[in-house]
Image (cartoon, rainbow, N blue to C red):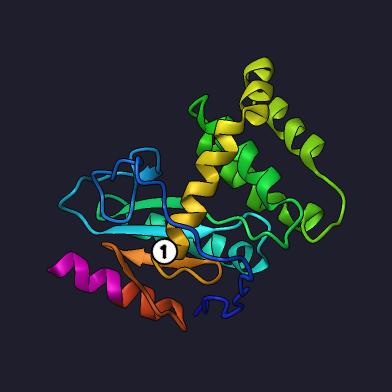
Amino acid sequence: MLVIAAIVYTIATRPQAPDPTGAEGALPGTRTNTHVFDEVGPDAPTLVEFLDFECEACGAVYPVIEQLREDYAGQINYAFRYYPIPSHLNSMNAALAVEAAAQQDRAEDMYNKMFQTQASWGEQQVSKADLFRSFAEELGLDMAAYDQTVADPATKTRIEEDFAEGQAMGVQGTPTFFLDGERLELNSLADLTNALDRAIEE
């Protein structure tokens, strides 16, 4: 049985207050701008993952989560929120690329691209923004719109708001999961599936 990676990256930055103007989403643990990939409705359990696209533990758990999403299709909501760890040089660049793709309704495609290629660009001390732009080209995005979104300070602010709210919710490393707004303590895949099964039964 696959076991969720226990690697935890600690964050040295000071917690910041979440944006008071951000509107809460319809699903627990989300905002109105949160990207929900599997949306069943507010009556179903909601799993939210705070992640960093450069985080090795997030990369390790990615195929597990993809399988879980398939296994629980139609039974749970799944959403992700940005938590780019400052010590990872390309984590913000990756998040900007995903958010720019999201503005063209291609968030999940870029999300998959980041994790599927992470081994080739992660943990490097040079910017990979050009590589991420090439991903956008491969996806057939409107590149003028992509470039504009990546360069727009509001895009970075939107990502930083997720990070700040994550800190306020007790996120200390990635990946961190919340089920119906409650942070989960996970040591194995069974811990997660058991929590989901209980939430579905309830």
Q: Quadrant of residue 173?
A: bottom right
Taking 29 as reference, is 132 left or right?
right
Main SS, magenta region, reads: helix
Magenta highlight on residue 200 = yes
User: Is residue 40 visible to the viewer in this orientation of the structure?
Assistant: yes
> Residue 11, how many percent across, how many down?
61, 70
Position of the C terminus, as image quadrant, is bottom left
In x, y percent, where is residue 47? 34, 59
Look at the picture and state if 44 lies above or below 154: below
Magenta region includes residue 178:
no
Q: Residue at x 77, y 31 (%)?
A: 134
Mark 1: secondary structure: helix
In the rendered picture of this protein, how many numbered marks are placed on residues? 1
Magenta span of residues: 195-202
Q: Residue at x 63, y 39 (%)?
A: 96
> Up-down: is 117 above or below 180?
above
In the picture, measured across the screen, residue 27 lies left or right of residue 66, that is left
Q: Position of residue 152 (x, y in %)?
A: 62, 27
